[in-house]
Every structure is written in structure tokens, then in C-alpha cells.
Amino acid sequence: MFASLSDRLQAVFASVRRETRLTPESVETALREIRLALLEADVNFKVVKAFIDRVRDRAVDRAVLDSLTPTQQVVVIVRDELLALLGDGQPGLSASKQRPQVVLLLGLQGAGKTTTTVKLARWLGANGRHPLVVSTDVRRPAAIEQLGVLAGDAGVRVHDPDRDTAVVARAEGAVQMAKSFGFDVVLVDTAGRLHVDDDLMGELDALKAAVEPSDLLYVADAMTGQDAIKSAGEFNRRVGISGVVLTKMDGDARGGAALSVVSVVGVPVSFIGDGERLEDLQPFHPERLVSRLLGMGDVLSLVEKAEQVVSPEEATRLERKIRGNDFTLQDMRDQLKTVMRMGPLDRLAEMIPGMSQMSGQMSTQVDPKALSQTMAIIDSMTRRERAHYQVIDGSRRRRIALGSGTTVQDVNRLLKQFMEMRRMLRAVGGASRSRTKKGGRRRSMSAGRRFPVR
Amino acid sequence: MSVLERLRAGLRRTAAQLVDRIDGLDAGRRADGGGPAVDTLDDLEGILLEADIGVAATARLLEVARGQTAASDLRTVVKTELLRLLELSGPAPASDAHPRVVLVVGVNGTGKTTTVGRLARLLALSGERAVICAADTFRAAAVEQLEVWARRVDADFVRARPGSDPAAVVFDAITAGKARGRDVVLVDTAGRLHTRANLMDELDKIRRVAGRAVAGAPHETLLVLDATVGQNGLAQARAFLEVAGVTGIVLTKLDGTAKGGIAVAISAELGVPIRYVGVGEQLDDLVPFSPAEYVDALFEPVW
């Protein structure tokens, strides 16, 4: 996501960096490019104008232009101003003491309210809460069924009264049920409606009055254009919204709507939805988004993703293995599996600093098919072969190739990769033991320095 | 209400803003009468950008406006150029196949299912009978939603089991359409982001299978675009054009404050015509699109 805006901004900065000295004119050229990049990312044109003016005011300053690293300074200014635009709202839900805490999800048709309701319930459940969901969408055909099916998939409880129960009664019923059965948060899915539809906006007012939600989340499609601030603004004026959930962020929408809504309507982005799986919802972190926009990487999100899929025990075990120099083909398989669980490779690559410039080439090289082929090859090995790669001779290689539907060349390539990996791991982690044994000298520190971390 | 009236009613909010603002601009002319003042052009740029017409198309319109002398009014100039951009796209494909297969595609949440229901209704009004095919086997309850529509418009309905192969149900629907002598088979597909290669491949498969069931199918592929969509609409249209051979656009949700201006850019840049517009919540609120009426409606001062 956001890749295109980030590409453009990086191109701008790359051209600025080539100049040894900045002049007001070269700043102006860069600003024009930034303006276009933001407009094409659907940032509201008034927001763009104000943004450019602020950056210009700060950039065309003698102190910046005469400094030793003027382009770096401009990057920092743009970064600061983007952050200021995104605000410093708390991601996630409000820390309300209300029990059950009531959350209302509202927005235009097709923004993704029903899916988001279940994703949010799943997220809350994974974070120790006990969510109950209810649909109040009696208008769209089969909307209630959709929520029921999705909730079933996610293992989330649904309040599902008779079909002819009125909108407000459905929500009130859910709150009652939560009280009786000990659910501590109720998520109320609402029908999609246009902000200019007076009757339906009135219905939201009635819902709000009846269940007194602590959070009113406006669900917005990341692909929305200039209209985003109008609709979000009108929902805010009529009903009041406490946060925005940006959906469909896994496409190539540049998500300028996010920047605009936050700065014009003044409500924070609480969550983002970035995939079709029910796990694909995360609290929103402005500083991470800005780093990613400017191609500075997003190490924090990467670490979090890794933590989600790797248990501490697993990590300790692996570390011991690397130190002991007995990293096996089985371990390689486990590692690949872990990586695949973390999500699509190209999206992981985006989070690594400096990687975004490379990821264009990366995506063609590391394709997921190659990964599953590697898995298939290892799966076709016996337990003994996986533990002791040395035993894999020509006849075994033929058998493995046949079993995995690959060629002997593929198997050879994998074994070569594996041995390369072992060699590197020995240099990084296992040096202390092996060196001590051979040379009698402890050289772990100097061995570590052979791979300086930048 | 006539078709034109409904279109106008739907576009009223869109138009009121655009026209008032462009008219307001006419006051700010350059003193020497040599053309619009710089401030005026800046404001016009803002108006066009806010309508999601996009950076490139806006630049073209501004170029035209800049060359005008004081005598011609800004509104006529912009209107003529908008119309020209819209008419750059080709006509709708004609086909005498029986049944005609119409594939409805798009990203998630643009209104594909609703559009299929309304298209069946529109066809029924012109005396054509449709088979509705529910090929969205991914989204929960999508099939049920479409079934309700099929009942409302009294069309035949062919459904798939959740999770089954969408191409197979399309084949079944076309076979059923042939057997029952229906005129059109309307295929509702699952919403998919245009960046998801594997899901886009699925569309390609549906097309191939449809082509085997009846020659030349699909005869029409409609991309459903939400009028609120911004510049990403162009990326969507480009991707669906490449993979699914889109022949027309359905612009939905025009009854809000969004102007769907990106459709102008799509029409001009990719040559894909807008075929229908959704202008309200009622069953009859899908109407055939005509560039002249659209632009007229946008610029008509009094309703």
C-alpha cells in the first residue's frame, strides 16, 4: 500500500539529493513534484495547498539552505509536516470504562462495515476482550446473514433476533444480552447510508441515543477521492465520529483520503484493514505510515509481525541451534514456513529500511511459488536426510526430485543454498564455539564484525 | 419520472456546486480582456481537482480555458471540452448472440450485486428476459443477497455453493439460459482488488469458460465504479481492462456528493465508455448514460 506515493516522493528526494546546494528555485521544483504526488494520491487539494505552503515556509530559510545537509533537512521537514497532518490520536479503541463498551460502525455503502465489524471483534478477542456483534442492517438484502457467516468463521458470538426486529431494538437487545452473559464489548454494524440521506442519518441519531456508544467508527474506503472529507465531515457533524477505519489498504490506493480526513475533519485513524483475511486489521500508527511513505522502512511493524508468528520458545531454540552450528534442513523448512505465515513477501520487504527502492526487483526474484517449491523438496526428504544433509547422494537426489515434482537441478540448487546459509550462520552466530575448537582462540567478536550492521 | 429527470435529480448536488462555482469565477477576469485571470484559473483548477477529474485531465481543461478570450464564457468552454473528453471513448459493443453474456466486475463494495439486479430490471423493461448468475462464491451471503434481487425483478437465478468454482456456475448459467431461451445472462462476480493477481486470473478463467459455452462470450464486460472513488479508479480501470477486457463502466452512487469525475479521465485516457449510472436507492435508479445529458445536467443552471 502507499507504494506509489512513496515511490514518487523518493524520486523527488533522489533528484534533490543530487544537488550539492539548494536554492529557493530547486526547492520550488521539488515542491511542485510533491504537490503532484499528493494530488494523485487523492489528498484533498486544499490540504495539499496548505501543506506545500508550510513546507515552503520552513524549507526556504537561510538556516536550512546554508546547512551542510540541506536535502536531509528538507526530508525532515516533509516528514514532520506529514506527521502533523496525520495527528497524534491514539490508535485502537478508546480506553472507555463503559461495560459493555459499545462501538458503532458507520459509513457509506460498500466501505466494508460488515467485514470490519467481524475483523474488529476478532482483534478484540485476541486482545483479551469478549466481543458480541449485532447487525442493524435491515435494508441491504442478506446483510444480516453476511455478518452471521463471517462471525461464525471468526468464532465471534452474534446477537441475532427475529428478522422483523426494528433497528434500535436490535442494538438494545445486544447490549442487554452482553450484560446478562458477560460480554464486555458490543460491536454494532449499521446499514450503509449516504451522508445526504436525512432519514437514515436520523436513524443513526436514534441508535446513538439508545445505546450510548463510547466509539463511533467511520469506516472509509482507502480508494475514496476528494469526496472523503465531505462524507466523513457530514457524518461527524450529524452524528459525531470518534475515529476512522480505513479499509482496502492492501490495494494500490495511495490513501490520501487518510491524510485529508484526519486534518480536515479532525478525527484520528483508529484502524486499517489491509487484506481479505479476518486477521487483516491493525491499529493505525502515523509515524510508521510516514516512515513507509518516505521509504524509511517500518521496522516496528515488521518486529510485531514476527512476534505474532514466532513464539519465544521457538526463537530460543533456533538461536541455540545456530550457536551450536547444527542448523538443519528441517530448521530451514520451519523458517520458511514462519516467513510465509508473516504475509506476502513484497509487503514484508516494504517494511525493511532501504528495501522499498529494491523491492521492485525483489518481487520478481522472490516469488511465493519458489518458496513452496523449496518446501516441497524438503518435504520429500526423509527425517534422516533433513537432519544430516551429507547423506543425500545422487540416487537420493533423484528420488527427492521425483517425489517433489522437481528436477535434480532444483534439488542441487536448494542444497547449495542451504550450505551457503549454514556458512553464513556459522560466521554470524556459531563462530565462538567452532573457532575455539579449531584455532584455540576466541574470536567471536571479530567474526561478528565481518558483517557490520548499518 | 423520466430517465433524464432522474439523472438530473441524482446529479443535483453535484451540479449545484460545480456550476455555481464556475459561474462565480467568471467575475474574476483579467482587466485587459486577454483571458481568464491567474486567480480564476487557480480556482478553476481547484474545482476540477475536487471533482476527482484528475491531474492530467484537469491540466488539459485548464490549457483550453487559458487560451480563451474574454468574449467566450468559461462555462461553455469547460462544458464543451468535458463533452469532447467523454466522447473520445467508443460506442457500446453490439452483439446478436443468444443468449448475450454480460460479466459484471469490480473491486469490493462498489455495488456489483445491486447493479446486476437493476440491470435485469432494465432489460425486463425493454422486453428482454435475463438469467442472473451468482458467481460470487467468496463473500459471505453474496449469493443470498443476489437471490433477493432476482426475486424482486422476477428473473431466473442460477447459484453456486459457497466456495465452489465460479467458472463452473457461469457455465451452468449459460447452459440454463440457452435451454430456456433467455436473452441475456448476467454474471455477478466476486469483488476483487485489481492488484491481486490470482483473483484477476480467476476472471480470465471465467471468460474462457463462458466463451466455450456460447461463441464470443462474454459479449459485454461492465466495470462497476463507485462515484466516490478517486485517482485509484484509473488504476482499477486499467487493470480490469487488461485482464477482463472491460467494454463499459457503470458509475454507481452518484446520488451522494461525489461527482465520479474520474470516469471522465477513464473515458479520455482508456477509451472505455460509461454505459450506466446509478442515481438512487430505488430499483429503477440505474439509467443508461449519455455524455450530452450528463454534461448538460452538470451545467444546467435551473432545475
Image: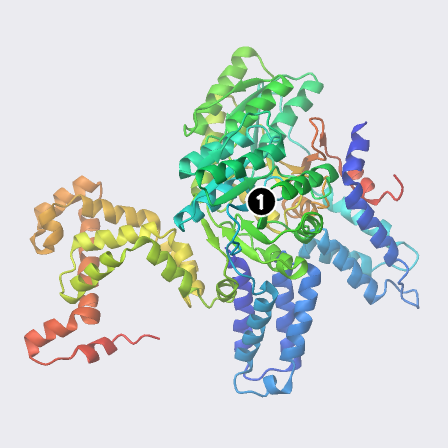
Q: Nearer the viewer, residue B3 or B62?
A: B3
Inspect the image, locate mark 1, and give the three-letter code of the amino acid beneath it.
Leu
Taking the view exactly as shown, the residue that stands out farthest to the top is B180
Residue at image x 81%, y 57%?
B65
Residue A272 drawn above or below residue A46: above
Residue B95 locus on image (x, y percent): 62, 24
- Report whether B70 appears left or right of B180: right
Residue at image x 71%, y 48%?
A238
Q: Is residue B216 visible?
A: no
Q: Image quarter for residue B275?
A: top right
Residue B185 drawn above or below residue A375: above
Residue A162 drawn above or below residue A442: above
Q: Nearer the viewer, residue A71 or A337?
A: A337
Instruction: Indicate how the structure is coloured in the image.
Output: rainbow
Q: Nearer the viewer, residue A407 or B144?
A: B144
| Quarter in which the C terminus of chain A is drawn | bottom left
Report in which chain the residue with disc 1 lies. A
- Report whether A413 appears left or right of A116: left
| Residue denoted by label 1 | A104
Taking the view exactly as shown, the residue that stands out farthest to the front is A180
The local secondary structure at tag 1 comes to: strand
Residue A105 drawn above or below residue B96: below
Residue A195 locus on image (x, y percent): 70, 44
Q: Residues within 10 Å of mark 1 (few under 14, many from 20)?
A: many
Residue at image x 44%, y 48%?
A124
Q: Nearer the viewer, residue A366 or B81?
A: A366
- Report whether A90 appears left or right of A26: left
Residue A374 locus on image (x, y percent): 24, 49
Q: Is residue A302 visible?
A: yes
Residue B274 locus on image (x, y percent): 68, 38
- State how many labels appear: 1
